[in-house]
Image: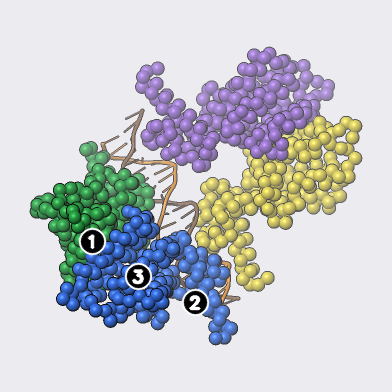
Chain colours: A yellow, B purple, C green, D blue, E brown, F orange
DNA sequence: CATGAATGAGACTTCATTCAT
DNA sequence: AATGAATGAAGTCTCATTCAT
């Protein structure tokens, strides 16, 4: 990679980082492109060299951050050698809760984009290869060598994801109705209840 | 109520109605105060006699519309004489799904504000008395004369509300991953799973 | 007219006047809206209260100034009691040449918008009543009680207008190929030649 | 011409061609240098190796295209052996009308620059030698062996050129007040009228 | 109470031009 | 000679808010 290419990468990263930082502190709507370029130390025109507008960089950040989270969760899961679909789901959920609890700003930023919808949508918008793996198929993959079988696994996962993301936003960001620490056992119990309701009794 | 008072009420209602209409068609961020007053047929200054800013009228609308939805649901439930906590929950969920399916614009508008959080937030922002009753306590009320008992009923309801609002937004507005018609039985099954996971076996 | 209405008029006139002044000194493309509002002593937003953009005010100015010129020419012609179509044409041409020679900036500004085209186009864009009279029909009016008759009077006038506006721009603004003083007799001779070529020999 | 020299020429021609194409389709003011270099397939910096700015390339194009038009007209006239000043003028006018009618984009582009003025202006801006010959002197040349003599031939030609360019722009580009087909006989009649008005009766 | 003209900060965006490679 | 990333001044336009009427 040439010096020029490197410099280009550096500018773009500066934009990504400062944008993320501003989005999570001031909020997206109150962050202006001027804010971003000023903090990133680049010229205004440079922003438009890489992004169409504020929402373009936001979408790319969401895709990137969501993919990062799932990638991390997956890696940890393999590292720990977690086996069995139910255990894997609980592990992944716990990992996400821990991760987001430590990054409440990230949680606010990703909120409602963390669920299935985002993956499908981003999909269609041609993600970079990095993000490719984190799609519906991933979930099929988790199930592949499990003895228990589930009715409509994609709907099962949709259900769990929506529940996790909604409750975790409320408990972590607003601490309402209770803290995540307090809610966590009930969330896991609820997930078990959902898993059961989707399981094929004769599977 | 005097003629003057009546006229005042009329203007305010015009503002509410046009604002809601514009918010649900153009979206909140793309609706300007100019748009609202122009469509409502009042002067710009008049807006500021009744509302602090765009977000003030939005919050008041959200409170009003959410309360309206719950009031309707409750009335229908009583009318039909639905008894028993589980049946009541399923009825209320079904009512909300039907109601929101017929008003997807309302759903988009209320989204993220439909759950528990909304009641708490609105609280803090001084609701009118009208909306006061529709709070967590309502749920306690539903449970009062039921034989089955639940562990942490408020967390149970929080769980259900988050699940319903998240999935119903996705299925109705984006038809993702499936339509609400297709998802509905799984939602009810999931709710049953959650109810079971919260029930006191020896209750 | 109330105080408010008067102030409104004053602002709009200030914009018209400064815009015209800047357009004729700096040129249209080099004049910015910021220039105009700054010179007019009004806020930027005020400009957009009255005009869509720079080209809107330009068009309105052209219409206004062109109408003004023709109105003046017509008034003087009546005042002097000039009779007979040929004499009237020569008078009008001379008046325009004198007028534009004294206002070369106006000439530059109106150039190529002075001809028939502008009148027809402006027409279609709904002029104010002030400008209404100055249209094709005006020319028919000049001919009404003349003994000589012309083939296609509208094409005759188109021909004369194009010739006058083109040559007068070149001679007055660029003094090329000669000054207007020097060219004027040849212009009148040419007009006579054109008139003759359009006259119905047996009229 | 070396390979390097050839490549240079190729790039410059690409710039000329794409600029002309863009100027005539999008208009000059809406064509950016970025548009030109992108369409030409060269780098932005390259543009500045050959041209000072957008107006530099425009002027050079105008000179080139105007010269081309006159050269063509002249060649055809000689080829057809048109003799006699009056016939030659009518032939040249007809040729120009035909040529421009087939290239209305060219007409729009050359407009206001087609007349005498263009030659003088371009002169001052250092034309290439190619374009030099097409000047007023050409007109003197046409007259050289004609029996009829004209008063102030350069003013005669100025008059005709202004009339032709103005009317042809209006009729061809805007089809106002009538189409060129309809106007053409009247234009020729007008030219005859002008010629007559300039002729030395006793010449 | 109601009005709506006026404001002006500031958002967004473009683009001619430069210059290190 | 050629490149094209970077610049940043300059422009357009919006819109929440005020205040004299």
Q: Are marks 1 and 3 on the same chain?
A: no
Q: Is residue A153 visible?
A: yes
Left or right of A10? Residue C128 is: left
How many residues crowd mark 2 within 10 Å: few (<14), some (14–19), many (20+)? few
Q: How far apart are labels 1 and 3 at the CA level?
A: 19 Å
Vertical order, C86 against B192 (above or below): below
On the rendered image, what quadrant is the N terminus of chain C found in? Answer: top left
Circles 3 and 2, Cβ within 8 Å, touching? The answer is no
Do dots 3 and 2 share one subunit? Answer: yes
> Badges 1 and 3: C-beta atoms under 8 Å apart?
no
Q: Residue D12 placed where, x, y %?
A: 51, 75
Instruction: Name the side, left or right, on which A15 lies relative to C156.
Output: right
Which disc number belongs to residue D49?
2
What residue is drawn where x is 64% and y is 53%? Answer: A60
State which quadrant residue B104 falls in. top right
Q: Nearer the viewer, residue B106 or C122?
A: C122
Residue assigned mark 3: D91
Of residue D5 and residue D106, the one placed in the foreground of this image is: D106
Q: Could you give the CA–CA distance between mark 3 and mark 2, rounded to whole angstroms?
A: 41 Å
Residue D130's place in the image compared with B63, above or below, is below
Taking depth in this image into account, of C60 and B113 the one nearest to the observer is: C60
Label 3 is found on which chain of the structure?
D
Helix, strand or loop for disc 2: helix
* Element type at mark 1: helix
> How many numbered dots are placed on residues in this image?
3
For the view shown, which residue lies furthest in the front direction? C202
């Amino acid at each position: 990679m040439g010096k020029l290419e490197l410099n280009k990468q550096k500018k773009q990263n500066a934009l990504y980082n400062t944008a993320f930082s501003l989005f999570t502190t001031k909020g997206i709507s109150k962050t202006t492109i001027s804010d971003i370029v000023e903090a990133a130390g680049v010229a205004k025109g440079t922003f438009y060299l890489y992004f169409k507008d504020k929402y373009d960089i936001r979408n790319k950040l969401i895709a990137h951050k969501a993919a990062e989270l799932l990638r991390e969760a997956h890696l940890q899961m393999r590292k720990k050698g977690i086996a069995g679909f139910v255990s894997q789901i609980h592990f992944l959920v716990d990992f996400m809760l821990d991760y987001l609890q430590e990054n409440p700003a990230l949680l606010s930023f990703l909120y409602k984009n963390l669920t299935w919808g985002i993956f499908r949508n981003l999909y269609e918008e041609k993600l970079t290869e990095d993000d490719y793996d984190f799609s519906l198929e991933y979930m099929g993959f988790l199930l592949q060598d499990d003895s228990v079988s589930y009715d409509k696994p994609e709907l099962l996962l949709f259900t769990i994801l929506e529940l996790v993301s909604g409750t975790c936003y409320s408990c972590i960001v607003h601490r309402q109705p209770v803290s995540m620490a307090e809610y966590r056992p009930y969330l896991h119990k609820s997930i078990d209840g959902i898993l059961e309701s989707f399981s094929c009794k004769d599977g």
